């Protein structure tokens, strides 16, 4: 995303926050399409994603093509002012293809071949799949690349959602080429993978395999490289499709939908964002409202705080959790506007009309099985109106905060590998706890990938920063010596990019900056807690921390824990500081420590004291000014006070949102 390029809009169209859904009319008789368009206008829909799973319909056989239905559909939508985000339709290959070419089917780590019958059953590295997919993309680009109704290209769908890790022979070949490019020589690889251990030394690249099911723990660096390679294979597929699109229809921007949500981490989205014109994300509420906001903030971090496209979320229940409950009143609108607050300039759902058949028939949609006369459709139509009232917000960036949480894909994946001091560590959970505690304190926070310039932030939290290559070590040191305040936690600074330990004591790469030294980790048993001197407790992890620099302040100690003493430290460095937290404090424990950290960094809440914690504040700033989004995190009414409100206010209803000019 070197240059941000947004949806193409027909000349004379006023900027607006776009609204719509995945639209699958190929599941419905033709007469339903007219009813769809009527209802889309009622709801204020102006964009739909089309043809995501239409490969079998567009190409019913190897040499037969059927575009007539799509011609008619795009013309129909365009005539009614509804733009098409046109998918390349490569997400799910048709049965004829996998029957003729079973060699495109993915293979699991224990050698099972995945069958057709679901979706996304293709190997990212299959040359046969690639050839068929690119032929389809070429046909679509040639046919629709200059249609005025096509506002964006949507490459594939959720790349890697079901097929990220393929252990086939195609993957083995591509993995070897990737490794050769990375290491140059087999000696380089042997060093990086530490193959002196367990007699793993390779004599040549063609001896290497993906980490298939092995007799014991596979080599950790091999595992990490396979994760990196698998993400790069998805990016390679994205780039191959994008190049066809750019060659044939250079005027239409290209996107692909990420999955920044919950524990999904198969694709390196910071890197993927560099290959598209604007970031898109799919988010489903899996762990509550704060996780939604955290994911939206991280998506904005990938988008470098420029506007992004919420490609999918749900109007109400999903179908893929063990128990699927509808959203409560107010949540449909609040969830959508939370994404807008964090930078979404388009709000779309999966999907427009709830399916009557297939695996997703119990997944909510904009038009439920009950039709127009339903609570969901009424809320959808209300939201469509609200988005139009917020058109001044369009094009604005998410305004920078004083505090950032650094979210590092490398550390996430490496810290959670097997054979570690504790298998209970959850990288994202630690980051989310800091986010939630900061929300409770009424602080605006950015969530940014490694590589984002940090100098503008007063306070940077880098939880469980396990992987610290030399360049990152140096940039964190420069941040602190430049006056920044850094906070990091247990299991940080441990390893370099090859997963080799920084020797001399923990936290390795960050030891000198923090002025402490740890000889052994002391993870806690499930349910075990350690008492802390500020009245809170730690869980998951503890460490005997030695202070080795005279200027280190001890902020919190372990109490009555025998060999444990120092728990939380801070070392002043010029006008900056570097703090270390050696246990999992959880939201409450972080909350108890936070005022010390915030005061030290000179960060204050922008919210009046009475509403801190009840309300999440997020701001956007652009040509039309600055807009504050105030989001009710509670089930009670909250009084905000007078202001220039574009929507809501001056009282927030339960789960309500207000938007006002700052
Ligand atoms: C997404 C996918 C959609 C739909 C949705 C259901 O993963 O892109 O096609 O399956 O989930 O929640």
Image (cartoon, rainbow, N blue to C red):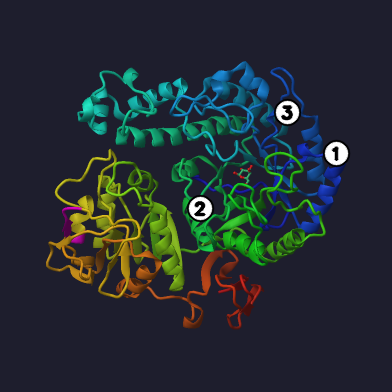
Distance from Cα at disc 3 to Cα at disc 2: 32 Å
Q: Residue at x 77, y 40 (%)?
A: 25
Q: Is 90 drawn above or below residue 499 in the view shown? A: above
* Residue 211 is at least partly visible in this image: yes
Q: Is 117 drawn above or below residue 556 in the view shown? A: above
Q: Is residue 129 left or right of residue 348?
A: left
Q: Is label 3's Cβ within 8 Å of ligand 1?
A: no
- On the image, which quarter does residue 63 sit in? top right
Q: Which residues are magenta?
A: 514-520
Q: Which residue is mark 1?
A: 30
Badge 2 density bin: few <14, some 14–19, many ≥20, Cα 10 Å: many
Is residue 517 within the magenta segment?
Answer: yes
- On the image, which quarter does residue 383 sit in? bottom right
Mark 2 or 1, which is nearer the eye? Answer: 1
Q: Which residue is mark 2?
A: 299
Q: Earlier in the sequence, mark 3 or mark 2?
A: 3
Mark number for residue 58? 3
Q: Is label 2's Cβ within 8 Å of ligand 1?
A: no
Of residues 212 and 242, the one drawn nearer to the viewer in this rendering: 212
Q: Earlier in the sequence, mark 1 or mark 3?
A: 1
Is residue 214 within the magenta segment?
Answer: no
Q: Residue at x 67, y 20 (%)?
A: 96
């Amino acid at each position: 995303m070197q240059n941000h390029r947004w949806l193409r809009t027909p000349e004379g169209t006023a900027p607006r926050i776009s609204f719509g859904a995945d639209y699958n009319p190929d599941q419905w008789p033709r007469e339903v399409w007219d009813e769809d368009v009527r209802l889309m206008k009622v709801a204020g829909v102006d964009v739909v994603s089309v043809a995501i799973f239409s490969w079998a319909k567009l190409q019913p056989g190897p040499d037969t093509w059927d575009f007539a239905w799509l011609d008619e559909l795009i013309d129909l939508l365009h005539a009614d002012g509804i733009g098409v985000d046109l998918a390349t339709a490569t997400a799910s290959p048709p049965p004829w293809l996998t029957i003729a070419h079973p060699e495109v089917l993915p293979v699991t780590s224990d050698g099972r071949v995945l069958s057709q019958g679901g979706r996304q059953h293709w190997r990212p590295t299959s040359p046969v799949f690639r050839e068929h997919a690119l032929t389809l993309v070429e046909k679509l680009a040639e046919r629709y690349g200059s249609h005025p109704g096509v506002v964006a290209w949507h490459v594939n769908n959720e790349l890697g959602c079901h097929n990220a890790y393929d252990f086939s022979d195609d993957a083995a070949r591509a993995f070897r080429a990737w490794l050769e490019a990375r290491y140059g020589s087999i000696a380089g690889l042997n060093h990086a993978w530490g193959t002196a251990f367990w007699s793993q030394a390779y004599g040549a690249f063609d001896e290497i395999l993906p980490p298939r099911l092995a007799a014991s723990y596979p080599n950790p660096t091999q595992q990490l490289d396979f994760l990196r390679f698998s993400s790069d294979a998805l990016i390679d597929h994205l780039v191959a499709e994008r190049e066809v699109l750019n060659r044939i229809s250079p005027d239409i921007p290209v996107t692909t939908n990420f999955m920044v949500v919950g524990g999904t981490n198969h694709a390196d989205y910071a890197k993927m964002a560099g290959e598209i014109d604007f970031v898109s994300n799919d988010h489903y509420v899996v762990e509550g409202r704060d996780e939604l906001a955290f994911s939206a903030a991280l998506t904005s971090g990938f988008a470098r705080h420029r506007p992004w496209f919420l490609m999918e979320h749900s109007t109400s229940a999903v179908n893929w959790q063990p128990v699927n409950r509808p959203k409560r009143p107010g949540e449909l609108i609040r969830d959508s506007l939370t994404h807008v607050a964090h930078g979404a300039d388009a709000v779309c759902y999966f999907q427009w009309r709830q399916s009557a058949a297939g695996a997703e028939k119990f997944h909510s949609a904009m038009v439920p099985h009950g039709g127009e006369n339903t609570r969901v459709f009424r809320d959808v139509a209300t939201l469509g109106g609200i988005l139009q009232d917020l058109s001044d917000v369009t094009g604005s960036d998410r305004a920078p905060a004083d505090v950032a949480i650094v979210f590092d894909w490398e550390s996430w994946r490496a810290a959670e590998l097997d054979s570690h001091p504790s298998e209970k560590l959850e990288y994202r959970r630690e980051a989310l706890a800091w986010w939630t505690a900061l929300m409770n304190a009424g602080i605006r926070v950015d969530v940014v990938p490694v590589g984002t310039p940090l100098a503008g932030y007063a306070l940077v939290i880098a939880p469980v920063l396990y992987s610290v290559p030399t360049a990152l070590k140096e940039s964190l040191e420069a941040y602190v010596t430049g006056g920044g305040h850094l906070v990091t936690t247990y299991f940080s600074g441990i390893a370099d990019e090859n997963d080799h330990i920084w020797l001399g004591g923990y936290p390795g790469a960050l030891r000198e900056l923090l002025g402490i030294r740890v000889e052994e980790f002391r993870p806690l048993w499930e349910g075990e807690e350690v008492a802390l001197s500020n009245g809170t407790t730690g869980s998951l992890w503890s460490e005997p921390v030695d202070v080795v620099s005279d200027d280190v302040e001890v902020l919190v100690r372990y109490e009555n824990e025998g060999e444990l003493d120092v728990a939380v430290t801070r070392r002043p460095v010029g006008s900056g500081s570097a703090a270390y937290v050696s246990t999992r404090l959880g939201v409450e424990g972080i909350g108890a420590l936070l005022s010390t950290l915030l005061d030290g960094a000179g960060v204050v809440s922008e919210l009046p004291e009475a509403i801190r914690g009840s309300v999440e504040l997020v701001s956007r700033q652009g040509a039309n000014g600055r807009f504050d989004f105030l989001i009710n995190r509670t089930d009670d009414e909250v009084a905000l006070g007078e202001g220039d409100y574009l929507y809501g206010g001056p009282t927030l209803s339960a789960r309500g949102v207000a938007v006002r000019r700052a």
